[in-house]
Every structure is written in structure tokens, then in C-alpha cells.
Image: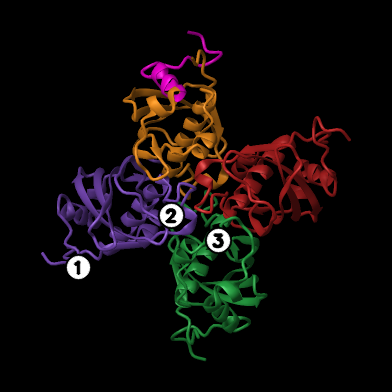
Chain colours: A red, B green, C purple, D orange
Amino acid sequence: MLESYQIFKRTVNYYETDKMQVVHHSNYIRYLEECRMDLLRQMQVNYHQMEEDGIMIPVLQVSCNYKNAVRFGDTICIIPKIERFHGVKFEMSYRIYSEDMQTLHTTAESQHCFVDLNFVPVRLRRDFPEIYRKMTELEGKDLMPVGMAS
Amino acid sequence: MLESYQIFKRTVNYYETDKMQVVHHSNYIRYLEECRMDLLRQMQVNYHQMEEDGIMIPVLQVSCNYKNAVRFGDTICIIPKIERFHGVKFEMSYRIYSEDMQTLHTTAESQHCFVDLNFVPVRLRRDFPEIYRKMTELEGKDLMPVGMAS
Amino acid sequence: MLESYQIFKRTVNYYETDKMQVVHHSNYIRYLEECRMDLLRQMQVNYHQMEEDGIMIPVLQVSCNYKNAVRFGDTICIIPKIERFHGVKFEMSYRIYSEDMQTLHTTAESQHCFVDLNFVPVRLRRDFPEIYRKMTELEGKDLMPVGMAS
Amino acid sequence: MLESYQIFKRTVNYYETDKMQVVHHSNYIRYLEECRMDLLRQMQVNYHQMEEDGIMIPVLQVSCNYKNAVRFGDTICIIPKIERFHGVKFEMSYRIYSEDMQTLHTTAESQHCFVDLNFVPVRLRRDFPEIYRKMTELEGKDLMPVGMAS
């Protein structure tokens, strides 16, 4: 199991800002995806390989709550959590912090589904038991970031 | 007041697709912004001029519910609605349909705030009474698309 | 043949600007793609169908010369030209103007190749003679925009 | 002076792919910007601070030569070079490699100008002598990547 979580860190790119001088709100949705892919990597799940094997994880729902704008020059830290896993669908939450973890910039949630290449839901337990096991283990667990005092 | 609404139509761009062969979910958030800007234009509000006058409308919250994937070659129609307007903040909802209006691809919601260039909320009623009046008129109203049978 | 060209017009989206208060330079590359797709449509070539038939047109080279920044609130007009067509590869040029055609914002060039889904070049003359014919007809021709004095 | 260059490495994001199953060509232009910002950081130049001080570096020209498509799951390495520096304008070149440096995916070039917030060229030597000195030192130099045999 994922004993400790290496916090997903991300420097803001210039092209992600808009004329309001802050990161455009649509880009946070992309940061969440980057964070999910990173979490999968830390869970030893290779999403690239998963798609080769015929399984995809599209987004069913996403919501974002913007509290404090992120600006060019900022680095963000994202802490994800698998809130619920129902075998096929799952729900995640995210907290996007400043680099020093003192400012909570954004909270977000997303829902996903394991599907085949025709967007038909797959029975993960039967067809991908290893991924099923890993998802089950992480469900509802708060990830303990590496290097943070407990 | 806005007697009839010219439906916001939008052809999907190739660069908005991803390797799942569908429009990447983050792009819907951008379509919503395009739709809002278009609605403002139809309300005779020039957002470009508004920002010149020192007032911006950042996004506080956004959520998207993906029902049917949109693909390259598709044209979408978006019907927005100003659900609630509280003088400074307001909430919108959106339905994203196929071109023939037969398929509901996505539903979405967003919250916004009128602020000055320092992100401080502005008193719209006092400082921009014309915009205040137009927002009030549209609050809670279902827009009647032009050319659709009532 | 394409007797007259309906100029590709495009309003700048807010999310395409950056904190320099102008359109981010990478987005012009996307505008060029939109313009190419539009030109294909005007040539009665359905790119979506082409890909269904197993033929794609990736970009081999692109260059952009930025003269005058485009800003939010601006509408641009793009005039494309098929400079050279070699049966498999072709080269295009583009002039991006302001809405009144008085300001030349950007000039650009791109090179492309007709390939199959494995990125292997296809013999257009043999396999897609209709597209071959249309490309040949337009090669080197200056498109005459509709509604402009000659 | 910049004695050794820490190669700019970048994992491809899912949202940067398109339905051709490869990275959309416009995104390479963004990778170049990321690489430039990274180079500035390695030169101890803080671009964020530069803009606070009233100096920006817009792009005048960019070109990209696509040789080998980059795919999701790939990591790229970019080696930049300041080809020429004329006091106000400068030209850069880039080579985008695979992670193992065995495949050259893309070559690119860009031209830039140091300007103030009104897009008026600034005299770098007089107003920002430290940046002027660093640019002069790197002009025409091949950066020696850290950890590579010479």
C-alpha cells in the first residue's frame, strides 16, 4: 500500500495565466488531472499501460471551489484523496495549497469511471484485480505527505 | 430586456480533443466562459469595456456534469441561465446540447463575483446601475432561444 | 473550384490571453488549425470524415511571425493560401488581420503531410483523387475573399 | 556564468494529446516557453520579478520542426541555446529529445525582445546591466548538460 505520499508540486506556467494576472480557472481542472496521474504513478499504476490494455478513466463530474488566486511565479501543492470507490466508479477530492502549505487556494472534487475503449464500464475486480485492490486500500484514507510532521 | 436568446453555437476544434478521441473535459469549462461572454454581448454589456472601467467577473466556483462525450466534428449549443443574482455575486447554470438539441451532453454551474482590479467586490447597484438592472431582469428567467417553438 | 473565399473570422477568447494582456503566442498556432479546417470545409472536404477513412494531416513544420499583438475584444481575420502541393506534402501561408483588414497582426507558414493512421504517407492521387484534384486546383492561388473589392 | 545546465525535463500531460494520439503540435510552443523560464531560473534571473520591475520578453517569432511525435507517457528533454543577443533582441534554438536523449523529436527557434510594459524596447545594458551581462555570457554557448559525458 501507499505508505507515504510524495506531494504533487507544480510550478505555474506563464501560458496558464490570463489577463486578470492570475491562473485561468480552467487550468486547475488540468492540474487535478496531473495530480491524479501522479497519484497513479505513486500507486505503481501506469495509466499509459492501462490504456494500452484497453481501460480508460474518463471524468464524469468535476467541481472546483476557487478561494485564493494562484499567480505566475507560484508553486502549488496538491493533496488528493480517493473518497469513495464503488468497484467501477470512484470519487476524489483535492486540496490545492501554496508551496508552504499555509494557504488553501482551491478545493475540488471529481468523479470517474473505469471503462473500456468503447466507454463501457469494466468490472475492475474481475479484469484488473491488482488495480481493484489498490483502489480499495486507498479508499477513504488521508494520504500522509512525506516529510510533514504528523 | 433580452427578449430572445440567440443560442450560443460552437464547433469543436481539433486541438480540444484528447487521445480518448473526445473533447478533453477541461475544455467545457472554457466553452462556458465563451457562452457567458456571448450572453453579455447579447445583453449589450461589453466585458472588454467593463475591464477597462475597472470591473472584472472572476469565477468563484464551477462544476460540470459530463453525460455524453462531444467529439471532433460536433457542434454544440449552450443555453445559459442566471439562476440567482445577489447584487455582487451571481450563479449561473448551463445546458450543453448537440446541434439538433436532441442530446444533452453536459450540465454545468458556475458562481461569480463582480470585483475591481484588486479583486475587491464592487457595489454594482451604485457604481454600475445599468449592469445591475440587466442582471436583475434576467435573474431566474429561462432564455427563449430564437427560432425555437415555444 | 473554390471561386470565392469566406474569410475565416474569429473572436479572441478571454482564456487565450495571458498576463501580458495579449493573446498568448501559442494560441495563434491553434487559430491556424481552425483556419485550415475551415478552408477544408469551404473546399467541401470533411476532415472528420477523412480521418474516419483513415487519412490524417499532421503538421510537419510551423512558423509564426508576430507583428502586432491581438487582445481580448479583438476579432481577427485569417487569409490562408496553399503555397505548394507535392502530392503528399503541402505548404501553406497565412496572414492574420484585424477585423477591418487594416492591421496585419501575424504572418505564418506551415507544412503538412497526408498520412494514414500509422503516420505512413498516403498516395493521395490514387487513394483520394477528389482531394488531390482540389488541392491541385488551389495550389498557388490567392483566395479572393467574398465581399472585398478586387 | 552558467557552468553546467540541468536539462529541462518534462512529462507529457494527458490533456496535451489530441485524437491523433500524440501531443498536439501547439503544445511544443508552450514547452519552449517552460524551457526558457527554466533557463532564466538557472541563470538566476527571476522572470516574475523582472515583470514586477517593468520588463517583459514577448515572442517575436517562433518556428518548430516536428520530426518524431511525442506521446502520452513520454518524458522529453529540451536543450536550449541563446544563439544571438543584440542587446535588445535575441534568438534562441531548442532541441527536444526523448528522455534517453537518443531520439530528436523536434527542433525549434524563437526570437524575443526585451520591452517595457508598453511593449517599448528597453536598453538592457543601461537599465538591467546584470541581465545584460548574463545574456552576453551565454550568447552562442552550447550548454553542457549536467551528468553527460563530454
Residue A95 lies in the magenta stretch: no
Residue that protrudes farthest toward the top in the picture: D150
Q: Position of residue B56 (x, y in %)?
A: 55, 62
Q: Are marks 2 and 1 in contact (CB under 8 Å)?
A: no
Numbered mark located on residue A80 in the image: none
Are the residues under marks 3 and 2 on the same chain?
yes
Q: Secondary structure at mark 1?
A: loop
Amino acid at pointer 3: Tyr
- Spatial separation of the CA atoms under disc 3 and disc 2: 14 Å
Residue type, mark 1 in image:
Val
Please tell me which residue lies in front, C16 or A58: C16
For label 2, the residue is: B14
Quarter residue A60 falls in:
bottom right
Of labels 2 and 1, the one closer to you: 1
Q: CA distance from mark 2 to mark 1?
A: 26 Å
Q: Residue at x 20, y 57 (%)?
A: C134
Residue at x 39% of width, y 50% of height? C30
Mark 1: few/some/many CA within 10 Å (<14, 14-19, 20+):
few
Residues drawn in magenta: D130-150
- Badge 3 marks a residue whose secondary structure is helix
Please determine whether, in this image, residue A122 is positioned above or below residue D67.
Answer: below
User: Residue B29's spot in the image, x, y percent?
Assistant: 57, 60
> Is residue B49 visible to us here?
yes
Numbered tag placed on residue B28 in the rendering? 3
